[in-house]
Amino acid sequence: MKVLITGGAGFIGSHLAEHLLAAGSSVRVLDNLSTGKRENLPVHQRLVFVQGDIRDRSLVTDTARGMDAIVAPGCGRLVQASVDDPLARTRPTSTARCICLRRRARNTSGAFSMPARRGVR
């Protein structure tokens, strides 16, 4: 299985990448490194790291191409920053882009996951 993890250089995403690699999957990680670190990811022949932002439409399209599943655990860990400047930390277009990822990947399994935003009422 080929899996794209957005925000994959963060705590959750990097652990997920390790698990998927151990299970035999190929993993592609898209992360802007705003809170994650490249060194969180293992060096592995089936892991490809792409540095960039999920708001970059062409990058997202290219990165999602050929994936069987997409997981989007990246949601930012800086709660106070989200409260102080919610538009900078939580963009509706980013959520929409996550949804479009699945469509653009033309994935046959339909596997897609992303966390619910906390604090949204």
Image (cartoon, rainbow, N blue to C red):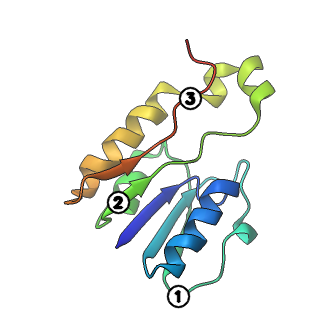
- Provide the secondary structure element on which disc 1 rests: loop
Q: Position of residue 120 (x, y in %)?
A: 57, 17
- Provide the secondary structure element on which disc 2 rests: strand
Tell me the CA gap for discs 3 and 2: 21 Å
Kindly identify the amino acid type of the residue bearing the numbered disc 1.
Gln
| 82 vs 73: above or below | above
The residue where tag 1 is placed is: 45
Residue at 47% from the left image edge and 25% from the top image edge: 92
| 45 vs 19: above or below | below
Q: Position of residue 27 (x, y in %)?
A: 47, 72
Q: Position of residue 84 (x, y in %)?
A: 77, 18
Residue at 39% from the left image edge and 55% from the top image edge: 70
Q: Which mark is residue 69?
A: 2
Name which quarter of the figure residue 40 lies in.
Answer: bottom right
Judge depth for marks 1 and 2 and give the one in front: 2
Q: Position of residue 43 (x, y in %)?
A: 64, 83
How crowded pointer 2 is (Cα within 10 Å; few <14, some 14-19, many 20+) is rated as: many
Q: Is residue 59 visible?
A: no
The residue where tag 3 is placed is: 117
